Amino acid sequence: MDGPVINLRQDRKRRVRANASERADLNRIAHGRSAGERRQTKADRDALTRTVDVHMREQKNSQPKPPIS
């Protein structure tokens, strides 16, 4: 038992952090879109939605007119 003395709790936490880091790296590769790309996609989608909404003939919240009798 002349080996180095280690704190088991700290060693366990270090291993958990290393595993989480490896898993995060794999997820970044698998789902790899940067935050800037996600923001740009959302901005493009919002702009398209606004364009379509402006050109709609009927608004979403309007009540249909009753038939004339």
Image (cartoon, rainbow, N blue to C red):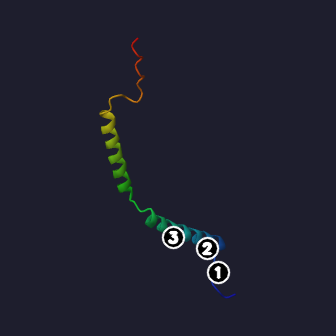
| Residue found at x 32% / y 47% | 44
- Residue 22's mark? 3
Q: Which residue lies furthest to the right in this view?
A: 1
Check disc 1 and report its element: helix, strand or loop.
loop
Q: Which amino acid does label 1 sit on?
A: Val
Foreground of the two, 57 or 51 = 57
Callout in the foreground (2, 1): 2
Q: Mark 1 points at which residue?
A: 5
> Measured along the vertical axis of the image, is residue 52 above or below residue 29?
above
Q: What element carries label 3?
A: helix
Q: Name the residue under label 2.
A: 11
Q: Where is residue 18 in the image (x, y as percent from the top left)?
A: 54, 71
List x then y, in percent, for residue 51. Answer: 30, 38
Task: Between residue 19 and residue 5, name the one nearer to us.
Answer: 19
Which residue is farthest bottom? 2
Q: Any mark on residue 31, and which?
A: none
Left or right: 7 with respect to 20?
Answer: right
Measure the C-alpha gap from mark 2 to mark 1.
11 Å
Q: Earlier in the sequence, mark 3 or mark 2?
A: 2
